[in-house]
Amino acid sequence: MAIVGAGPAGLTLARLLEVAGIESVVLEDRSRDYVEHRIRAGVLEQRTVDLLTEAGVGERMNREGIVHHGIELQFDGERHRIPLSELADGRTILIYGQTEVVKDLIAERIASGLPLHFEVSSVVVEPTTPRVTFRHEGSTHEVDCDVIAGCDGFHGVCRPSIPDGVLQEFSRDYPFGWLGILAQVAPSNDELVYAHHERGFALLSLRSPELSRLYLQCRPDEDIEEWPDERIWAELQARLGVEGWTLAEGPVLEKGVTGMRSYVVEPMQYERLFLAGDAAHIVPPTGAKGLNLAMADVRVLADSIVEWYRSGSDAPLEAYSENCLRRVWRAEHFSWWMTSMLHRPPEGDEFELKLQLSQLRYVTTSEAAARGLAENYVGLELV
Ligand code: APR
Ligand code: PHB
């Protein structure tokens, strides 16, 4: 197996294959340091936690991760709790940074002595042969393999190596982005707060008992230079503030702006190349689904490869995309729905605003509506 990309998808796949006794080479174009310090989301569904635990890479996650049983939705200056576990079969979510998941997976791969090459360049993927060539430490290498896993994210080389006309793309861009900070301060609330506000959406999240993660809706092309720390805190206070509560502030360790997009490619495969994670689909971060989708893809892919070797039949590999896409589209819908409900619509669209508030009132008063949110948020197997 050749695995292109050492994000959560590629590294988890490599580990699942290792456990099954299948050899793989992992290729990553960035440095180990870069990959281990890229700040990403941090909400793990139960099935993601189970997968990592079963794969033997969940020890630190289970020790340091923080179990959450609910989230809060805020609008009209009030907070409303959605009791996720009560509504969704006792399931919980675990707060543990994607960055930490990646560090744990890399440490395991290196300890096992199996091939993981950072800072490769000129990666060329031939899906039909199948073969991957790349440059590493001054020489050119060739991997003749049975299967190639395209786990190289949205901007990778695998998807573009599929001939024109094979793939169909579905996408939506949003007229806003998120400005995110990581701050050295104890989280001001025990649970995540998703806030609808006339100044724009805000999210209170966390990484650990000492680290808060906070986001503000902004323009997709927002210039971070225009956002000194004081301005960010003032805006967070305004959007997240409720009577009798203030947001604790602390040193900002990291800040950045990300755009938001929904994107799916169908099918998620061509010949012997299989796309997984962000290489095949993108969700806006509001539903916290990106990492969880990537993990669910590689579980299906690993099982398909194992079954393909065992049975000698192509059927398990041929079914990969179909086995993923129903779950992918459920998460696409949920992420789009959460995004549409919570973000300030473009100036003057009062109709949209009224719809959002009506929907927020509905999910915070009807148990049936809240259950729909909860089941999707924790990632129950619904489809
Ligand atoms: N060759 C080798 N590696 C590459 C190439 C290339 N040509 N292009 C990109 N990569 C690497 C990237 O540097 C990155 O480390 O592929 C990796 C892809 O990892 P992610 O972007 O983290 O994607 P994925 O593993 O699918 O994880 C999905 O990450 O982007 C978030 O929100 C998303 O949480 C979700 C998760
Ligand atoms: C995060 O903690 O980074 C986070 C949490 C919830 C989201 C998105 C991101 O919906």
Image: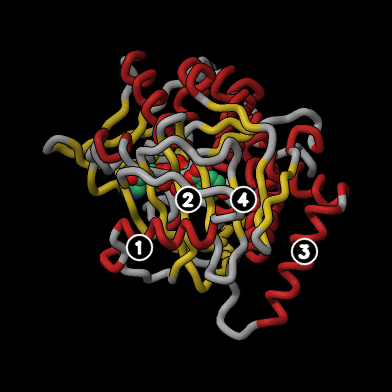
Q: Residue furthest bottom?
A: 348
Report if the CB atoms under discs 4 and 3 are less than 8 Å apart: no
What amino acid does circle 1 point to?
Arg
* 120 or 367: nearer the viewer: 367
Q: Is residue 169 left or right of residue 140?
A: right
Question: How far separated are the C-alphas under marks 2 and 3?
Answer: 32 Å
Q: Which residue is depicted at the point 27% across and 40% down?
A: 34
- Whether ligand 2 has any atom under 8 Å from the Cβ at mark 4 is answered as yes
What amino acid type should be assigned to the residue bearing mark 4? Gly
* Circle 3 residue: 359
Relative to 30, is 96 on the left or the right?
right
Nearest the camera: 219 or 107?
219
Q: Residue furthest front?
A: 244
Sequence-wise first label, 2 or 3? 2
At horizontal 33% and vertical 14% (from top left) the residue drawn is 111
Q: Which residue is mark 4?
A: 287
* Residue for badge 1: 231
The answer to whether mark 2 and mark 4 are in CB contact below 8 A is: no
- Label 1 Cα neighbours within 10 Å, binned few <14 / some 14-19 / many ≥20: few
Residue type, label 2: Ala
Residue 117 marker: none
Residue 169 % position (x, y): 57, 65
Q: Earlier in the sequence, mark 1 or mark 2?
A: 1
Q: Position of residue 113 (x, y in %)?
A: 31, 15
The Cα–Cα distance between marks 2 and 4, rounded to whole angstroms, is 19 Å
Residue that carries the numbered disc 2 in the rendered image: 279
